[in-house]
């Protein structure tokens, strides 16, 4: 391997340093973990809930299809930690913190076998105190596990090549298989294995001939250990390719805010952005970085470049080429995807980057050996100073700058989590409505410990209980209408809890309502749709002259339907031709009929876009429901029923303001 001349260090001192670095990394990941980061991000909560479902159902899934599909190993660890210590954000994140701390000795092992002890000690100090690694290992996301398992697998591979023992190759196969159970980016590792084999054959052919029989244990164990996951992918091909297809960069760039902030970049731009993330500009996502900050500060970036140069030149060998190839291969998941550089998808490149930076620091520390003892002391002190300077800069950036960014409050769903915690004391029998987030929002479910929350979009209307008290969790920062509606509709409204954002402004409220609903639609109706419920009434102006017509619908649910139904509101002319129409699932698709509860009222606001060329006159309005897949309308009964729709009433289109009334020959006759 490519070793750097190392001063004589007693083994016990070396071991003590690795232990000390590991404990320091653990402390940096557990310090103030109940406050930094705040809240609990959507993906963290999702994984925590899946782990709790494992404990509840006594299952051991090899793949989790929800939330775009996720590998299971980290979720298995979360299940163990929550079984032992309870279901809280600090438990989830402490699990990631322990994984992050254990990556320190794993980084030491793989760097030592590649570059020697001094480079290994430097890499073990550099990796845990990069802002990249510190940030991601204080959050409970599954990709935090890949560097640990990856380092162990590659260390075992290198040891197998070095010693020729079948056991090492077999354990390496098990390690690489475990990588496949950690994170999607691990699917680039077969390319690394192939490159290692080709490189060994080209650079060290005698060694390759001596090791090939023992090395056969690696693919054998790898295939056996991956068999359950591969079997799942064969039965569910989209589980393997779906997420990769979603985030694959294209030419031209395609923007999708679900997958990252900022410019998504193109297939031509993103490889260069990814290569530049170490010294130029890093991830823009606040959850994994101080937006735009490169991986290394200028001083450590110089050491990283020095390490790359040392791996390329000087005592060239398989180890230096392998480390560089390792780095490039694990950058591919970011380079080929949108919103590059993406620290999550590039997480597998962090260990080789730290190893190369460690090689650079070790090279700096040993420069003085060629001059004399005094120069050796100076260069060694300079190397230690570089590591300490970079480390303190990272800690200050994370705990003083990143932690105080106002954006972390919303980035980690802190307000939603606080609202959910406030719901915990509510009686299980009390209906709880939330707006405008879905009722199954993982952060809200994890925090409230309730799986029966009823979410709707209050910007499109409101859902009301049939009788008795209820609770409403409202994100008033985005839903500014539900609170006023509750005050108008219920005689008794009592705010129970207010969530304040960091600047001190109210961000969300938990409100309790009781008493008899005060519902009075302008046009009461008698229409019963057989599969869904009743249209109790409608409200709309008798006349309008604008290009939009606003309508309020009041439904009372019969209960959940077997399939979600789409509602329609139509304006018909004298010949029953549709002149304006609105189609959607109720409440802007936020409260489908398949979730309606018996007796509930759904008060909805819809808007019909009216053509500017529509002539003045009277038009008939009808309302109904249909199955989107088949187009079949739901039959209706009652005084105001029309067989498969409800007659909501008549509306008059007036001439546009400022123009004379249209002559009678242009008016639409009364139906």
Image (cartoon, helix red, strand yellow):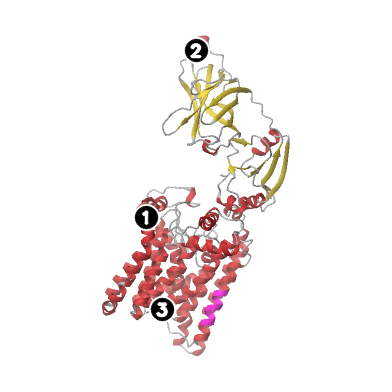
Q: Quadrant of residue 170?
A: bottom left
Mark in front: 3 vs 1: 1
Residue hosting label 2: 666
Tell me, yes or no, whether the highlighted magenta stretch contains residue 107.
Answer: no
Drawn side of residue 289 relative to residue 319, left or right: right
Residue 106: x, y in percent? 47, 73
Q: Is there any visible trace of residue 404 in the rendered image?
A: yes
Which tag, 3 or 1, sits closer to the chain's start?
Answer: 3
Question: In the rendered structure, which disc, 2 or 1, sits on the residue that comes first in sequence?
Answer: 1
| Quarter-of-image position of residue 162 | bottom left
Residue at 57% from the left image edge and 53% from the top image edge: 411
Label 3 belongs to which residue?
113
Separation of marks 3 and 2 at Cα, in angstroms = 90 Å
Element type where label 2 sits in the image: helix
Residue for badge 1: 233
Chief SS of the magenta region: helix
**Earlier-in-chain disc, 3 versus 2:** 3
Q: Nearer the viewer, residue 467 or 321?
A: 467
What label does residue 158 carry, if any? none
Between marks 3 and 1, how big is the CA–CA gap? 35 Å
- In the foreground, 598 or 374: 598
């Amino acid at each position: 391997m490519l070793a750097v001349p190392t001063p004589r260090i007693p083994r016990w001192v070396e071991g003590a340093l690795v232990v000390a670095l590991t404990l320091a990394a653990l402390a940096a990941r557990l310090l103030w973990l109940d406050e930094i980061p705040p809240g609990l991000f959507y993906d963290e909560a999702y994984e925590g809930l899946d782990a709790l479902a494992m404990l509840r159902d006594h299952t051991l899934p090899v793949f989790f299809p929800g939330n775009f599909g996720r590998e299971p190993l980290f979720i298995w660890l979360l299940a163990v930690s929550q079984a032992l210590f309870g279901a809280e954000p600090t438990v989830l994140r402490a699990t990631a913190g322990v994984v992050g701390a254990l990556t320190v000795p794993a980084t030491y092992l793989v760097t030592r076998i590649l570059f020697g002890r001094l480079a290994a000690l430097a890499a073990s100090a550099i990796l845990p105190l990069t802002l990249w690694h510190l940030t991601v290992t204080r959050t409970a996301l599954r990709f935090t596990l890949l560097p640990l398992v990856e380092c162990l697998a590659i260390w075992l591979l290198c040891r197998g090549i070095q010693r020729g023992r079948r056991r090492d190759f077999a354990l390496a196969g098990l390690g690489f298989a475990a990588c496949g159970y950690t994170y999607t980016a691990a699917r680039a590792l077969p390319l690394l294995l192939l490159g290692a084999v080709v490189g060994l054959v080209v650079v060290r052919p005698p060694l390759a001939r001596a090791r090939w029989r023992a090395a056969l244990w690696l693919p054998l164990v790898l295939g056996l250990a991956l068999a359950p996951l591969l079997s799942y992918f064969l039965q569910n091909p989209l589980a393997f390719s779906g997420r990769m297809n979603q985030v694959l960069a294209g030419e031209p760039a395609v923007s999708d805010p679900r997958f990252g902030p900022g410019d998504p970049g193109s297939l031509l731009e993103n490889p260069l952005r990814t290569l530049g993330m170490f010294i130029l500009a890093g991830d823009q996502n606040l959850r994994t970085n101080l937006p735009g900050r490169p991986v290394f500060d200028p001083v450590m970036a110089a050491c990283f470049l020095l390490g790359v140069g040392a791996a390329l030149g000087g005592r060239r060998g398989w180890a230096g080429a392998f480390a560089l190839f390792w780095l490039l291969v694990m950058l591919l998941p970011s380079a080929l995807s949108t919103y590059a550089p993406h620290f999550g998808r590039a997480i597998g490149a962090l260990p080789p980057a730290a190893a190369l930076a460690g090689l650079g620091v070790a090279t700096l520390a040993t420069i003085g050996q060629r001059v004399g003892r005094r120069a050796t002391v100076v260069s060694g002190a300079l190397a230690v100073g570089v590591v300490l300077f970079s480390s303190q800069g990272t800690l200050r950036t994370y705990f003083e700058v990143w932690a105080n960014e106002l954006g972390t409050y919303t980035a980690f769903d802190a307000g939603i989590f606080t609202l959910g915690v406030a719901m915990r004391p509510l009686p299980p029998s009390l209906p709880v409505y939330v707006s405008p987030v879905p009722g199954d929002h993982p952060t809200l479910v994890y925090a409230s410990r309730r799986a029966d929350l009823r979410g709707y979009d209050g910007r499109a209307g409101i859902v009301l209980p049939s009788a008795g008290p209820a609770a409403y969790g409202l994100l008033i920062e985005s839903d500014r209408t539900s609170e006023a509606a509750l005050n108008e509709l219920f005689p008794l409204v009592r705010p129970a809890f207010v969530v304040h954002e960091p600047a001190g402004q109210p961000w969300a409220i938990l409100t309790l309502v009781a008493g008899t609903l005060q519902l009075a639609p302008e046009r009461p109706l008698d229409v019963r749709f057989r599969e869904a419920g009743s249209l109790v009434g409608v409200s709309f102006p008798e006349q309008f002259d604008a290009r939009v017509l606003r309508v309020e619908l009041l439904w009372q649910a019969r209960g959940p339907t077997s399939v979600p139904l789409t509602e329609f509101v139509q304006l018909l002319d004298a010949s029953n031709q549709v002149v304006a129409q609105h189609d959607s699932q109720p409440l802007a698709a936020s409260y489908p009929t398949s979730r309606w509860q018996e007796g509930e009222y759904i008060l909805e606001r819809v808007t019909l876009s009216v053509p500017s060329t529509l002539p003045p006159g009277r038009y008939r309005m009808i309302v109904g429901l249909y199955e989107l897949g088949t187009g079949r309308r739901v039959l209706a009964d009652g005084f105001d029923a029309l067989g498969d729709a409800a007659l909501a009433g008549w509306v008059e289109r007036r001439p546009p303001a400022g123009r004379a009334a249209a002559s009678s020959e242009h008016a639409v006759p009364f139906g």
